[in-house]
Image: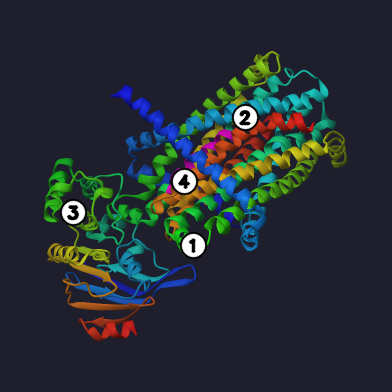
Amino acid sequence: MNLRTEKLDLRFGPTAALDEVDLAIPAGDHLLVLGNAASGKTTLLKALAGLCRPTAGAVRWDGDDVYALRPDDRRARQAGFGMVFQTDALFDSLPVLGNVLLPLTNRGVPRAEALTRARDVLGEVGLADAADRFPERLSGGMRRRAGIARAIVARPSVLLADDPLAGLDPHTGLGVARLLLEVSRGRTLVVCATEPPPGLALRRWVWVERGRVTYDGPPDARVLERGAA
Amino acid sequence: MRASAIPAWAGATALEAAQASGALAMVLGRTILQLRSLDRRELVRGLVLFGYRSLPLSGVIATLIGATVVLQTSLYVQRFGARNYLGWAAGFSVVWEFGPLLLGLMMAARVGGRNAAELASLNVGGQLDGLRGISLDPFALLVAPRVVATSLSVAGLATVTFALAVLWEAAAAFFTLGLPVRVFFESFEQLLGFGDLAAGVIKSFCFGLTIALISTTAGLRAQGGARAVGHAAAAAVVWSSAAIFALDFILTPLLGALLT
Amino acid sequence: MSALAGIGAPWLLLARALRQSFRRGVSLREVLRQAYEMGNRSAWLVVSGLGFFGTVMVAIAHQQARRFTGNITVVGPAYFELLVREFGPLTVSLLAAARAAASSSAELASMTVNEQVEALEMSAGDPLADLVAPRVLASAVVVPALCVLGTVAATASAVATVSLAYGADGFSYMDGRFVDWGDVACGASKAVLCGLFIPAAASARGLSARGGAAAVGSAVTLGVVDAALGCLVIDFFIAVLFLLARA
């Protein structure tokens, strides 16, 4: 899916989270969105996924204005996205397997097929043994893996990850980074972070500052120095 | 299996109840000890936050109580032919029961819920331990002034609510029954004594104190994350509401015997 | 202004939730689970609250009657009618508002703050149909049931108080001679409307929580205040409506 934002404005009350953001993400692109805390990265990701209605401007999926689509159509096409949340956002009332099954059963995949697919994905992320455990019984790294499993189980063409290595120790972080690269092969991948995550070298960097895109190009350490200054 | 589960449940419940009432008693006791050296700024902040800011809400409640009570009593006033006593009957039920009860229930949510949530998020965020770390007593700073402010606020709001509700009742009686405002207030004045009004204010003060104690205890006992804060606020609202009904049950005959 | 929004927004959310649940269907299991939770958690509160309330009302009727007739059994039938039409539905709704609105708004607010509502959307779920509608449907059935329970509790305690404490014939307090279908319809319509409103008010505040733990706390406070205030408003308008219909 080709993603595009056009003069995207998004405000929460008086504060502007996004300010005239123009960004084109062709299908299959791998993109790292960098910025300090509260610069608007998360909001950008959620707007791309059709979760936050913009105040002005548009988000386009293959050219169609997302927020002009009928809610049911939008929900149907949202299936093309998988999102890994910063807080993991696992449903605490369901075990890991239930969390991963939900995107499938909600889309009407037959129970038997959904179970096989969910178990396959859990094997892929290395959680085959933890399928019946509840989220509160998981370590940080396992929760992140479960979040990734839930995001990719419906085979989305775009994978969005909001600070996926935050709060993980370096070793676990490297594992999660490797997993993200593996599962995003052949897909669009957009990752948000405050600094380039080790082990997750992506070919395009975007720097966001106070809701504006101030750099868009190949990895460049000077961007970080300018941002820190 | 089942047989052993029941004593275990009873034991856990009793333990929980003992802990909770111990915590309540401690909050009350320490507040009384702090009474003479209350932090003035926090007290004023509490009065503004819990009392002054709740004025619009208590105005709305007063309007609804006043109008509803007249609507309901007017039927019987006509049926029993006691038009001239409407002022007294309506005023009596507002001051003795509906004023304190409905105001108490609303304040359990607004003031109790907010107080518990604020203390719980300070507690969960580690700020209370932070205060202790720089040798400030969170109790003197946050708890005692709030308990006093909440009790005073609810009693004060009750007075305002009574006055407004009675005014609305007079207006409602005029419009629905064509009862002259003068007749309404005459029966109100002649039959309603100072004792009745005092009973209503005392009741409200006790409700306020209960709300303050329960919500503070719930806030200080919160442990965990965002979920715990929500849980503390919800528990404060529910237990305060339950306590208000129980207290009403004890206070009504007691005040009735003492003041009338 | 914010009070008006607090009364208006839930109706809007209610309409959207019902429309969305017609389109997508609602899980009956989830409705039953919510109904069980709500009934189970509120029943003791309603029974004990209304039990106390029944006694208090008798004590007050006694004080009032003492000044005139001296015979508290005279007001019995009127008391019972008022209980069915007014006190029962109002008091039970307020208690249900405290109990159910507090727990629903806390639950939904912490889901919202922890991005679980967005995660549900990304999992092809619908927050309105999956989270709000089951609560609304359950509560529309449970609150009227609690009303019946509460009315029974208040009547029983009134009968007991009059018989034991005042030594009069307590059964005049369950004398239904004044109660007609209008009273029952009035009480029932209040209970159903409050039942619909309470979870809608709680959900409206819960789903719009923004921020961290503090936002969850204020969502609970606002949710319960909106729900309780909404019940008072509903109670008033239905009372006016039935009074006009009677006239």
Task: Verify CB contact (< 8 Å) between mark 2 and mark 4.
Answer: no
Residue A122 at x, y percent in the picture: 15, 51
Of tags 2 and 1, the one toward the viewer is: 1
Q: Main secondary structure of the magenta part?
A: helix
- The answer to whether residue A206 is magenta is no
Which element is circle 2 on? helix
Report in which chain the residue with disc 1 lies.
B
List the residue tagged with mark 3.
A153
Picture disc at residue B90: none
List the residue tagged with mark 4.
C14
Q: Cα distance, mark 1 to mark 4?
A: 44 Å
List the residue tagged with mark 2.
C53
* Left or right relative to A196: residue C8: right
Residue A181 at x, y percent in the picture: 14, 66
Tell me the kind of residue under disc 1. Answer: Leu
Q: Is residue A191 visible?
A: yes
Task: Verify CB contact (< 8 Å) between mark 2 and mark 1.
Answer: no
Q: Residues within 10 Å of mark 3 (few under 14, many from 20)?
A: many
Q: Residue at x 17, y 71 (%)?
A: A200
- The answer to whether residue C99 is magenta is yes
Residue C98 at x, y percent in the picture: 52, 41
- Identify the mark nearer the N-term, 2 or 4: 4
**Residues flagged by tags 2 and 1 on a common chain:** no
Query: Which segment is the magenta one?
Result: C90-106
Of tags 1 and 4, the one toward the viewer is: 1
Residue B28 at x, y percent in the picture: 59, 45
Picture disc at residue B131: 1
Which element is circle 4 on? helix
* Left or right relative to C231: residue A214: left
Q: Nearer the viewer, residue C113 or C200?
A: C113
